[in-house]
Image (spheres, rainbow, N blue to C red):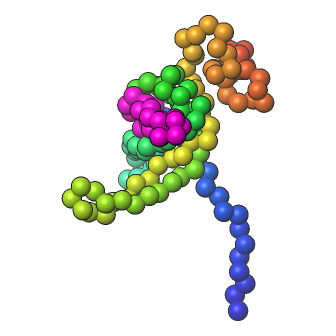
Amino acid sequence: MAQSIKFPRLNNVILSGHLTREVELRYTPNGKPIARLGIAFNRVYLNSDGNWIEEANFIDAKAFGKQAELCAERLHKGSPVIIEGSINTSSYTDRDNQPRKSVEINVAKFHFLEKANVAGDQAEDSFDRGGQPVTDDDVPF
C-alpha cells in the first residue's frame, strides 16, 4: 500500500503591482472596515519561439480593520504596493442565474511604496522590520 504523504497546508501569496482603481472602503453592519482594491501585476515568460513575453494580470484583494482604513487613506489608483496574504475563492450566482467563481487575495500585510504626505508619518512608509522605520539610507536604490 502507498504511504500517505504528509505536507504542510500553505496558502501564502506575495504580489507587487499597481492599483487599478481607487480603494473602495465600506463598513459592515458591526462597523468593521473592509477595503476592496484591484491590483495589476506583470508576468514575464519565454514563449515557444524564444521571445520574452510580458503580460498584465489582474486580481482583486480585500483588507480588513485598521489596514482597510490605511489603504483607503494612503493608496490611490496607480499606487505601487506589495501585498502579502492568502488566496480566497468563492462561488455565487450572477443576475442571469449563472454560477460564477471569484478569486481574490485576503491581505495580511501591505507594504506602501510611496512616501506619506503627512509629516512625521515614518512608520507607515516603512516595510515591517520589527517596528523600526526604514530610512532612505536603508533602501539600496
Answer left or right for 56 relative to 129. left
In percent of the image, x 65 and y 58: which residue is there? 10
Where residue 140 sits in the image (x, y, percent)?
68, 22
139 w.r.t. 81: above or below: above
Answer left or right for 3 relative to 33. right
Is residue 12 found inside the magenta-colored segment of the image? no
Q: Most extreme residue toward the top, as rendered?
A: 119
Is residue 26 found inside the magenta-colored segment of the image? yes
Foreground residue, 50 or 41? Answer: 41
Where residue 3 sits in the image (x, y, percent)?
72, 84
Where residue 60 sits in the image (x, y, percent)?
43, 43
99 w.r.t. 126: above or below: below
Foreground residue, 43 or 119? Answer: 119
In percent of the image, x 39 and y 28: which residue is there? 22
State the extent of the magenta-drawn residues as a range: 18-41
In percent of the image, x 48 and y 27: which residue is there? 72
In percent of the image, x 51 and y 47: which residue is there? 105
Where residue 45 sits in the image (x, y, percent)?
46, 48
Q: Main secondary structure of the magenta part?
A: strand
Q: Looking at the figure, which quarter contains the N terminus?
A: bottom right
Whether residue 39 is visible, yes or no, is no
Whether residue 106 is visible, yes or no, is yes
**Quarter residue 42 falls in:** top left
Q: Looking at the figure, which quarter contains the C terminus?
A: top right
